[in-house]
Image (tube, rainbow, N blue to C red):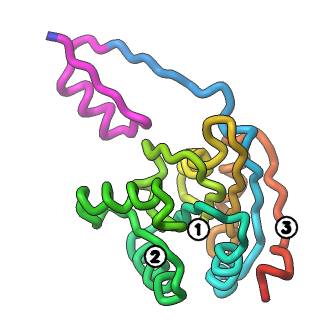
Amino acid sequence: RQTLLFSATFTQDIINLSEQWTYKPIKIEIEPESVATANVDQKVYLVSAEQRYKILLNLLRDEAATSVIVFANRRDQVRHLYERLRKASVPCGVLSGEIPQNKRTRTLEDFKRGKLKVLVATDVAGRGIHVDGVSHVVNYNLPEDPDDYVHRIGRTGRAGATGTSISFASEDDAFLLPDIEALLGERLECEHPPESLLA
């Protein structure tokens, strides 16, 4: 018998599981050529926590934002954001661990077909979701794990297309930037959002 285990990431729990269920395992790792794709224009906006929603809403009203994934760190943040966007008549869906699998699949299909312009998600959607034509990824919160940043922004700029990632850095999470920059091997230029997004 041969046992094979595949994972996008190997946390300590998965490593322990593999050691428990395999005999003399061989580990094969495939590293991407570069950590972040060159096809993604990465922007970091310095904003206050109160400005985030207004900037996001103005961003979603921009014609260039045709298909957008918005990432937040926690399920409650995702749920709250989704409800606010729906009240603002933004065609959106939600993906998180608390959503049943069949509903997640349906939401993802609607997003792929363009029935939904926006997908609000936790990192459960950051890995293994392949949707062509995502124009923007928005990090409503900076991820606590730098690897999640790379997975999130990798949802855009796929299959030779270009994309834009916009990360909001606020007083509560800007301290996470140095670790992200260390993983990327480059400095991220932080800027204030354009006035049009603050209107």
Residue 23 in the magenta stretch? The answer is: yes
| Residue type, numbered disc 2 | Gln
What residue is disc 2 on? Answer: 77
From the viewer's side, name the closer residue of 198 and 28. 198
Q: Against 91, is 163 above or below?
A: above
Q: Are circles 2 and 1 on residues that touch, CB within 8 Å?
A: yes
| Residue type, numbered disc 3 | Glu
**Sequence-first disc among 3 and 1:** 1
Q: Residue at x 77, y 59 (%)?
A: 43
Numbered range of the magenta stretch? 2-25
Numbered disc 3: secondary structure: strand
The quadrant in which the N terminus is found is: top left
In this picture, residue 87 sits left or right of residue 23: right
Q: Position of residue 116 (x, y in %)?
A: 48, 67
Q: Position of residue 163 (x, y in %)?
A: 70, 50
Q: Residue at x 53, y 63 (%)?
A: 71
Judge the density around disc 1: few (<14), some (14-19), many (≥20) Cα neighbours within 10 Å.
many
Residue 3 in the magenta stretch? The answer is: yes
Measure the C-alpha gap from mark 3 to mark 2. Answer: 24 Å
Q: Position of residue 2 (x, y in %)?
A: 19, 12
